[in-house]
Image (cartoon, rainbow, N blue to C red):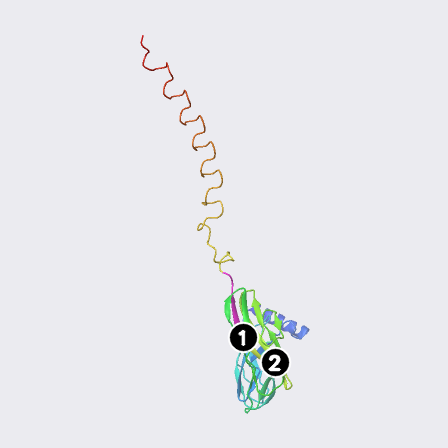
Amino acid sequence: MTLRHLALALALVFVAVLTGCDYLRPSGNFIVSPESGVAPLEVAFENRSLPGILPITGYEWDFGDGSPIVTEPAPGHTYETPGSYTVTLTTRNFLCRDVFKREGIVTIFPGNLDVMVDFAISPAEGQAPLPVSFTDTSKLDSFNVQGWFWQFGDGGTSYLRNPKHTYRQAGDYTVILSVSTEMGTLRRVKTKAVKVFSIEGEAAEGEAPVEGETPTEGEGEAPAEGEGETPAEGEGETPAEGEGETPAEGEGETPAEGEGETPVEG
């Protein structure tokens, strides 16, 4: 380690002592999918922790069911016993740690119940603006459903059972369905469930021909009045009276009597 690196490390330690790691600790976070179901239930944990100033050096997962601590960044875990479980994620760097906890985030029901919160999306991808229909396909056995709450990932929400929502910006959106029952609220999270693409090109109408195809108004269309049409009166039309028509009487016709005729006997 160079002198410069040693000085930097000492400075960081000094800041950590003075601030209690407030500016150096990482920020732990995660989401769970699915959050409820029938035992045995395999659950995936998506790590959304942020490192802060210093890089993250390790993770510790406590799944709340007495199983051993897991140190993988984004593990999966199977819950075998019915119950409600609190999951804790500890995130570390070489100076500080952060403990992030979600109370009762996983709910497991007995295996003889047919319980699962789920939903269908149609279409799941497309070009913005994209109208999407969401259908609740949850299996809740004999549970009394009290309400639905949808979070569409772009700030939009709905309390309908089968809502529709239009995505107007490109991006990947995580959708969450929460179903309230007399047994508590059950949720299903689908990460990046909707993919929205941006409009290609600047022609938002998209299907209109680009410049150079069908001519725009006034460019290559039938000529406007007075421009290349049938000539106006007096311009290239049948000559007006006295102009190029059959000569008027006395002009170029059969000569009048006494003018160029056979001479009178004499």
Kindly identify which residue carries mark 1. 191
Query: What is the chief secondary structure element of the magenta stretch?
Result: strand
- The residue at the point 57 percent across, 67 percent down is 166
Indicate whether 128 appears above or below 224.
Answer: below
| Residue 105 image offset from top left, x and y in percent | 61, 82
Classify mark 1: helix, strand or loop: strand
The image quadrant where one finds the N terminus is: bottom right
- Is any atom of residue 37 visible in this view? yes
Where residue 49 appears, as percent x and y from the top left, is: 58, 75
Task: Identify which amino acid the numbered label 1 is placed on.
Answer: Thr
Kindly check if marks 1 and 2 are in contact, taking CB atoms under 8 A apart as contact: no
> Which residues are the magenta region?
191-199
Q: Earlier in the sequence, mark 1 or mark 2?
A: 2
192 falls in the magenta region: yes
Total label count?
2
Which residue occupies 67% across, 73% down?
Answer: 19
